[in-house]
Amino acid sequence: IHSGGKLYRCSECDYASTRNANLKIHMRIHSGEKPYKCNECEYGCTNSANLKVHMRTHSGEKPYECDECEYSTTTSGCLKLHMLRHSGEKPYKCNECGYSCISSGKLKLHMRRHSGEKPYKCCECDFSCAQYGNLKRHMRIHSGEKPYICVECDYSTTTSESLKAHLRIHSCEKPYTCNECNYTCSKYDNLKIHMRIHSGEKPYKCNECAYDCTSSANLKVHMRIHSGEKPYKCGICNYSSTTSGCLKSHMLTHSGERPYKCSECVYGCTSSGKLKLHMLTHSGEKPYKCSECDYSCIQYGNLKRHMRTHSGEKPYKCSECVYEGTSSGNFKKHMQRHIVEKPYKCTECNYSCTHYKNLESHVRTHSGENPYKFSE
């Protein structure tokens, strides 16, 4: 505070303070000591000030309010940073590149990208990172701790961000909006993935076939086509599926329930996605348009298949024969031909088939008999 005063330095990192009390609190970051505990949840922290701020997440109190917009927050520091967004001011500049930001903390973190410094290290594995918060979250992988608990259901998670995103499911809040179409969602990460539909970016590639996609989750589901894994099983019949969503929709076929109703006609269905597609038949909207011709359609998958008529691409290749196809649906049907039992076998060659009539026709190719005879 006063220039020229004694500095108390941390022996573990480059932290320094003019107050020994601050250094003592800081050292708890390295020791893991958290003497201040929340009586509402499992949260613990290194000092009383942080606990006071945390308690506002339970009370909903946000005493610091912006006079420019509706923003309010739990700390004066957060409000101060928010106000810089209105002014556009970014007073903290990087001397290595053109980066600038609104806080010294963000600049300090950014500088570690240049230096490669990762001062926070996991004592259980070789993980290291530039931010203490990331280490804290990582340690929960080892401990299994999920301190953020939903009061509406039994969901729990390792991060406050994940809990906030989850709570939007209950509130139906979808603050993230696509500027290309009317898509909205509750998580920014979901919007990022969605934007790849418009940009055409597909960073996740299958190492078994030409399939690529916009998210790691979709790739994981796709890989089950190759492995044959169907982990989601119906308890009423022998149906099994690659995704929990498909199983959930399937279960409605047993109950007969069709909770999604069309407001224009009597149509009802088992999923919001199907209803959304159905509504396009009323509006006539075809949001997916071909850049090569005047083709347009209501489903992105149909546009993707259509584009292959221009490119000539046939990404679905049979490992049993020379078949190549443009769609996974046709490919699946084709593969059934290989796995279906073929009890009728030719004694002259390795031909086999599912119907006796087909075998009769085939045998004539060996005898030279013309099966197609016309009477004169």
Image (tube, grey):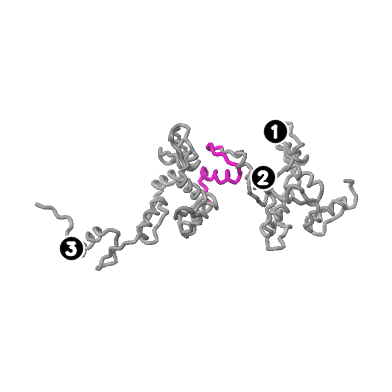
Q: Secondary structure at mark 3?
A: loop
Residue count near mark 1 (Cα–Cα under 10 Å), binned few <14, some 14–19, many ≥20: few
Q: Secondary structure at mark 1?
A: loop
Question: Residue 131: image x %, image y %?
Answer: 72, 53
What residue is shown with label 2? Answer: 151
Residue count near mark 3 (Cα–Cα under 10 Å), binned few <14, some 14–19, many ≥20: few
Does the CB distance between marks 2 and 3 fall below 8 Å?
Answer: no
Between discs 1 and 2, the one toward the N terminus: 1
| Separation of marks 2 and 3 at Cα, in angstroms | 78 Å
Which circle marks residue 70 in the picture?
Answer: 1
Q: Residue at x 76, y 39 (%)?
A: 80
Which circle marks residue 301 in the picture?
Answer: none
Between discs 2 and 3, the one toward the N terminus: 2
Question: Residue 299: image x %, image y %?
Answer: 45, 42
Q: Residue 318, relative to residue 275: is it above or below?
A: below
Part of the protein shown in magenta? 179-202
Front position among marks 1 and 2: 2
What residue is shown with label 3? Answer: 368
| Residue type (three-letter) at the residue carrying disc 2 | Val
